[in-house]
Amino acid sequence: MSDKLDIFDILRQIDSKNRNYYRDLPEEDKKKVVPFVLNRWVSAVQGPFELQDFYLYRCNDCINKHFFELYKYPELQWLSLTAISPGMGTHRHEWIKQKPRVNNNKVIKFLRSFYPSYTDDDLETLAAITTTDELKQLAKDHGWADKDIKGALK
């Protein structure tokens, strides 16, 4: 067991579509693999615009849509990450730092739980054009209980 896994080695495994990498890791190392962090790394790649565009869209298609629903299944998250690569060798991935969030309005916090990658400006715009009934319906569609919805929006 290593003390620390090499992020660039893990990214190479994703780019090369090594579907068995996660499964073959020792249990101690599996705990060190954080799919959310990997998703941030994988989505940004150096190279031609078309390649960058491809990785970003594939991350949205393969990971972002249902990422948090799969949190109990890290191997499935891994397999989803390996589906992103076009199978064209390995690429240099970058970490893109997220802007700090400052708006803590209740509606903004509520919307942030559904759209964690949105900026405060995006959330403020969404809050301005969304009615309370629409917010409640959004929460219901995601399985929230009525008491939780009231607590989040009041």
Image (cartoon, grey):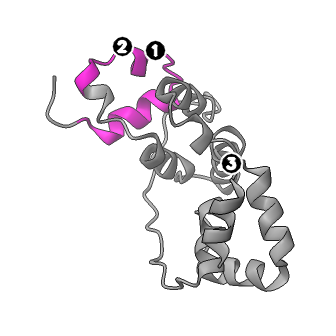
Q: Name the residue under label 1.
A: 20
**Image point 63% across, 29% down: which residue?**
83
**What residue appears at the point 61 percent right and 70 percent down from the top-left corner?**
151
Are the residues at dot 2 and dot 1 in contact (C-beta closer than 8 Å)?
yes
Name the amino acid, label 1: Asn
- For residue 23, above or below residue 138: above
Q: Which amino acid does label 2 sit on?
A: Asp
Is residue 131 one of those drawn in magenta? no
Q: Distance between the residues labelled 1 and 3?
A: 23 Å
First to last magenta residue range: 5-28
Question: Which quadrant of the structure image shows residue 120?
Answer: bottom right
**Type of residue at label 3?**
Asn
Please, what secondary structure does the residue beneath circle 2 have? helix
70 horizontally vs 38: left or right: right
Mark positioned earlier in the residue sequence (1 or 3): 1
Residue picked out by circle 3: 60
* Residue 10 at x, y percent in the picture: 38, 33
Q: How far apart are marks 2 and 1 (CA)?
A: 6 Å
Residue name at image x 47 percent, y 46 percent:
36
Query: Which labelled disc corresponds to residue 24?
Result: 2
Looking at the image, which is closer to me, 69 or 120?
A: 69
* Residue at the image position 47 percent from the left and 29 percent from the top: 74
Q: Does the magenta stretch include residue 21?
A: yes
Quick one: SS at disc 1? loop
